[in-house]
Image (tube, grey):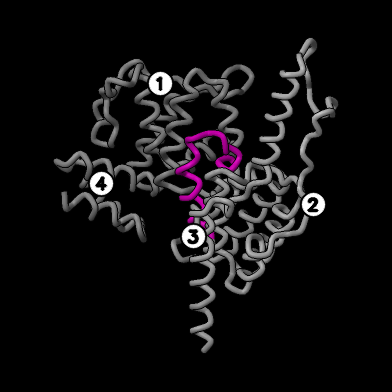
Amino acid sequence: RERAPMVQSLARGLSADDEVLLEKLLGDRSKEVRESAASLLARLPHSPHSQRMGAALQAMLSQDAQGEWQIEPPQEGHKDWERDGVTLQPPAYVKGHRAWWLQQLVELTPLDFWHQQLNKTPEQLWEWSRRSDWKSALRQGWIAALRAQRDVRWLPLIQSMESDSRSSDVLPLLMAELSADERETQWLAQLQAKLGKSAFIEAIHRIDEGMGRTELLSPAMSRWLLEALLGTLQSRQPAGNWHSWQADHAILACARRLQVGDLERFAQLWRAPSAAAPAEPVASDDASALVVPEGSSEADIAKLQQEQQARLERSRLRPWDDEQVLAQLNRIVDLRLALQAARIA
């Protein structure tokens, strides 16, 4: 148990100097040590292990008459694969030996192999897999490989997979490989693309998850986000559900991540709310404000009006209308301002 995390620690500063030790560990008595060694060797494209994995996949690739690449796993697994980290017998929940072997081989092969062998971008590889009988095995293998290899060339593709749960744990890992300036450039592009849409809330939430525990936004990005929040939340009908747990997390994240110099203006959202005119209630005799099914009675219309009025009232609620969220916001802002004042003093 002690050796497994020691092997995993080699990921930091991994180089060709580690190949001899890692190759030896492929024969270790511990399954976890063997798997960790194989995963690390996959990050070294020129290692003997990576060359063997690439050769195994290359034997499965061919081109049809139109020059389109095809992949076909073998009917029989190779005993030599086991030493390289491939489990020949799939677990009970996996159906199909061949797909299981292919997925593992893809996971343990450097992603460079696919770029060089097929001459395709990540987006093109993803589209190519869609036309294959082995789409699921290929895609799951690539996602697993990304967790270990963290190839930032795949970042645009992963960012485009927002609705795909497979990307949720890979995106922060890839973002962590970028410099602070590069990450903020990516984040700003995401926020700008979502501004004025309901997904703006989720974009803030994702950025917060990708930051270090005490990390702050840069002054420029802090100011941009503050202005975006003020413009959004002080409007009459802001896009998105701002009375939801996602909105609560997003606003609390802003209280933690904005520059301290922006906090007083930020706090005006709930301490001195805009005097914007409230939404007018639905007039009882204004049938045109409702979509009323033909043949509805007066009682039906009255019920629809009440429901619409309730929706309007909910749409005006903000995170700080919840007492617990309001208390957290005030505590975070006041503490940060007090700490800043103490440092200046």
Question: Are dots 4 and 2 in contact, CB under 8 Å?
Answer: no
Please report the bounds of the magenta region as a residue range: 157-178
Residue 35's place in the image compared with 9, above or below, is above
Q: Residue 33's quadrant in the figure?
A: top left
Q: Is residue 20 left or right of residue 298?
A: left
Q: What is the CA distance from the residue labelled 4 to the residue labelled 2?
A: 70 Å
Foreground: 174 or 300?
300
Q: What is the CA distance from the residue labelled 3 to the residue labelled 1?
A: 55 Å
Is 169 colored magenta in this rendering? yes
Q: What is the CA distance from the residue labelled 1 to the residue labelled 2?
A: 66 Å
Q: What is the CA distance from the residue labelled 3 to the residue labelled 4?
A: 52 Å
Residue under pointer 4: 23
Residue 318's place in the image compared with 107, above or below, is below
Question: How many marks do you count on the picture?
Answer: 4
Foreground: 165 or 114?
165
The nearer-to-camera label among 3 and 4 is 3
Question: Are dots 1 and 4 in contact, CB under 8 Å?
Answer: no
Numbered circle sitting on residue 328: 3
Q: Secondary structure at mark 3?
A: helix
| Residue positioned 74% across, 56% down in the render | 231
Residue 127's place in the image compared with 159, above or below, is above
Is 143 colored magenta in this rendering? no
Residue under pointer 2: 277
Q: Residues within 10 Å of mark 2 (few under 14, many from 20)?
A: few
Question: Are dots 3 and 1 in contact, CB under 8 Å?
Answer: no
